Amino acid sequence: MTSFGEHDAYVREIMDFVKSGGLLSSRRALSERDQYTVETDLSAALHAAHTQFDEPTRREDWTDLRERQASRILAAIYQRPDADSLLATLDDLSDLLTQQIIVLMKRKHTEIVDDIIGDIGHCVSSRAIWGLTDRFFEMLWLAYASGGWPCGWDGIYPIGQMIVFRP
């Protein structure tokens, strides 16, 4: 794997976790104090993740929020002089993660595999660029590292709590 300098260990942590099969199985604690709400019903979690709200509510549209946060990663990459090589490296890591996740998640929660692949890839990219400093992607990563699937935001980001499905 390519080195990410001072952030290398942070990227490797995610890669190693995925490779070890920890997705949706680890049991680190999440708490409301840490801004998480745990959901144990997959149907409710899928509703939180994929419902688009036509009018202002107290719940942020999860897809829109994730896309806004991911766009900050691309903006930061394109400001770097090594943008092309960094994008190529991150694409290679994304391909590797995709293969590993598909194998690990075979026939288990197939309806959320695409979300997991995208989220984990963004967490890797965030850590490659910013280390541990990005609040959103570190919260997203902690949810996955705890054995959950982040599926929504209760509130209007950054106020509120991340909703996390735990099987």
Image (cartoon, rainbow, N blue to C red):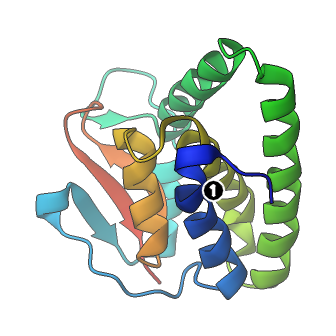
Residue drawn where x is 31% and y is 21% of the image: 56
Quadrant in the picture for the N terminus: bottom right
Is residue 92 toward the left or the right of residue 138 in the image? right
| SS for callout 1 | helix
The quadrant holding residue 107 is bottom right
Residue drawn where x is 88% and y is 68% of the image: 99
Query: Is residue 47 shown above or below 128?
Result: below
Residue 167 on image: x %, y %: 47, 84
Amino acid type at image mark 1: Ile
**Front residue (pair 115, 20):** 20
Q: How crowded is mark 1: few (under 14 residues within 10 Å), some or many (20 or more)?
A: many
Residue drawn where x is 68% and y is 50% of the image: 121
**Front residue (pair 78, 113):** 78
Q: Name the residue under label 1.
A: 120
The quadrant holding residue 32 is bottom left
Residue drawn where x is 32% and y is 52% of the image: 162
Q: Can residue 50 be seen in this view?
A: no
Query: Is residue 157 shown above or below 132?
Result: above
Is residue 103 toward the left or the right of residue 60 in the image? right
Q: Can residue 74 be seen in this view?
A: yes
Query: Is residue 68 shown above or below 39?
Result: above
